[in-house]
Structure formats: C-alpha cells, structure tokens
C-alpha cells in the first residue's frame, strides 16, 4: 500500500481509511479520417479497432499522461491524481502522484514519485517508515490487480493492453478531447482474454489480475481514439472488494522524450515497511 492509515473521523477521514484498506494509499492500426460516416463504420469493426489501440501506442513511442483514480465505497469518495511521461516501447513510465488530504485538511505527504515498468513498481516518498531518499520496489506480479489500481495511478500501457480483451464494443460518436477529434467507443474488457492476448511484458500482471484481482471479470470502459488509432482518453471501471474504482487516463504530446531511469540497488529500501 502507498500510505499508512491515519486516525480521523468524518467524511474525509472515512475516505482515507477506505483508500488505505484497498492499498491505494499503501497506476490500432491507423484508422481512416474522422470525417467518415457518423456510425463509425469507416473506421472498421469497433471491436477490432479498440483491440489494436495498444499497438498504436507502441508505434507512437511515448507520450505525456495525466491519470485520475476515483474510489467510492460506503458513501465516501476519494480521488488520486497523477502526471508524468510514458515510453510505450520500453514499457517505462515516471509519474508524480498526488494523494487526498489527510483528515485535518492538510497534505499528509509530498507527491509520491512512481516508476512503472513491465515487471515492477517503484515508489519514492511513500512514507510508512521508508527514508525519504530511498525507493520501494514491488513486483508487479505480487499485486493482485497487476498494478491497475494499487499504485493509485494505472499504468497507461497496462490499461491499453486490457483493451485487447474488448467485447461488446459499440461506436458512441465523434467528439473532441483536448482539442483533438476522436472517436468514442464503449464496451467491456474481458480480463482473461486480455491476459492471453497481451504483450510479453504485460501478460503476467494481467494474468494475475484476471485470476484474483477484481470482483468482476469484465471491466466496463469508454475509450476515445484519434485518427491514428491512439488512445487519447480511457476510462475503466473496476470493482475491488466493496469499492468501485474509476480510472481515467489522458494521453497527449506523443513522441516527447520520456527519460526514465530506474534506481540503483543501493537506493532501494531493504527494511521492513510499517503496516506490512
């Protein structure tokens, strides 16, 4: 989990407790032009277009990304936000994740720095007794949700790879996201199908998520693709235990430099983390 649990009462305190319990506080082939028929047929079969969107991101190379994770349970709601860059070819990302306020209304921690890789999640400034200059490394396969929810920011490539299991996909309409013309599709992603079709780097984590990560095997989604089939916006809804989690990923500025360097072994915390 990203942060330890704090004592507190009231709506905000309850929200913090729910997040702590879940571990959130413990991350196509080109389509035709968007001026095509309003029913989306010119873009091809909706399901096939959506299932190929992860490949389009790899071809794009990299992008900036904003993430938002909203969790609702028992009448409480919290939001965790992240911002960073992601290299889709190397499957590496770096994000600054901002957590909700503590019960007193002040920020409990500085933003958490997260490094995402195909096999691990690294976190810095995570608290729980970890020195400020040290990183915590967590094996992605050890996370029951494959790091779709645990880190508080969904790994952008893992989110797109989940679309490889897209089923019951329909074309909603043409819209704009961040000033870009996009096609809006809606459907349900089958976790097991996604794990079978995923790239080698994401297959293990998605397989774990399919086996035990969520209360439902199907993940409802809304995805917005540009004229190159790249994900511009993706909203996915997960059910974890008694909570509903909505993860939103925005991708933009494709091709930007995404310099991500993993920490050296000497910089990784080897001690016991409080609360574990």
Image (cartoon, rainbow, N blue to C red):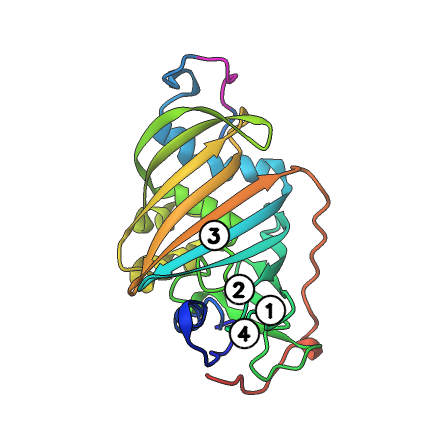
Residue 5 horizontal/vertical position (percent): 47, 78
Q: Is residue 14 visible?
A: no
Judged from the image, the secondary structure of the residue bearing numbered disc 4 is loop
Q: Nearer the viewer, mark 3 or mark 2?
A: 2
- The magenta stretch spans which residues? 31-36
Judged from the image, the secondary structure of the residue bearing numbered disc 2 is loop
Query: Counting residues from the N terminus, which is met first, the one under dot 3 or under dot 2?
Result: 2
- The residues tagged by marks 4 and 3 sit, at their Cα atoms, a distance apart of 44 Å
Q: Residues within 10 Å of mark 4 (few under 14, many from 20)?
A: few
Q: Which residue in the protein does label 2 denote?
A: 100
Q: Which residue in the protein does label 4 denote?
A: 104
- The residues tagged by marks 2 and 1 sit, at their Cα atoms, a distance apart of 17 Å
Q: Residues within 10 Å of mark 3 (few under 14, many from 20)?
A: few
Q: Nearer the viewer, mark 2 or mark 4?
A: 4
Q: Which residue in the protein does label 3 denote?
A: 200
Q: Is residue 34 magenta?
A: yes
- The residues tagged by marks 3 and 2 sit, at their Cα atoms, a distance apart of 34 Å
Residue 30 horizontal/vertical position (percent): 52, 25
Q: Which residue in the protein does label 1 denote?
A: 123
**The quadrant where residue 98 appears:** bottom right
User: Which residue is painted at 70% across and 72% down in the image?
Assistant: 264
Q: Is residue 97 visible?
A: yes
- The residues tagged by marks 1 and 3 sit, at their Cα atoms, a distance apart of 23 Å
Q: Residues within 10 Å of mark 1 (few under 14, many from 20)?
A: many
Describe residue 77's horizontal placement relative to residue 190 as left or right.
right
Question: As displayed, is residue 137 above or below residue 223?
Answer: below
Type of secondary structure dominating the magenta stretch: loop
Residue 230 horizontal/vertical position (percent): 53, 33
């Amino acid at each position: 989990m990203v942060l330890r649990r704090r004592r507190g009462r009231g709506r905000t305190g309850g929200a913090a407790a729910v997040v702590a319990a879940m571990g959130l506080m413990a991350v196509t082939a080109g389509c035709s032009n968007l001026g095509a028929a309003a029913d989306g047929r010119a873009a091809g079969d909706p399901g096939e277009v959506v299932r190929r969107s992860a490949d389009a991101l790899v071809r794009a190379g990299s992008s900036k990304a904003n993430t938002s994770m909203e969790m609702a349970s028992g009448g409480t709601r919290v939001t965790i936000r992240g911002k960073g860059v992601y290299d889709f070819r190397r499957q590496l990302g770096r994000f600054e994740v901002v957590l909700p306020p503590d019960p007193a209304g002040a920020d409990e921690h500085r933003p958490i720095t997260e490094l995402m890789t195909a096999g691990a999640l690294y976190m810095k400034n995570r608290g729980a007794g970890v020195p400020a200059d040290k990183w915590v490394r967590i094996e992605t396969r050890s996370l029951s949700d494959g790091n779709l929810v645990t880190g508080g920011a969904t790994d952008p490539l893992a989110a797109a790879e989940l679309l490889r299991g897209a089923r019951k996909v329909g074309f909603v309409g043409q819209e704009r996201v961040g000033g870009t013309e996009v096609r809006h599709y809606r459907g349900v992603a089958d976790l097991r199908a996604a794990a079978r079709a995923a790239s080698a780097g994401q297959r293990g984590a998605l397989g774990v998520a399919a086996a035990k990560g969520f209360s439902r095997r199907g993940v409802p989604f809304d995805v917005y693709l540009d004229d190159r089939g790249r994900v511009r916006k993706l909203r996915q809804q997960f059910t974890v235990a008694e909570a509903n989690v909505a993860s939103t990923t925005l991708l933009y500025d494709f091709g930007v430099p995404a310099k991500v360097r993993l920490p050296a072994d000497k910089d990784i915390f080897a001690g016991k983390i409080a609360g574990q």
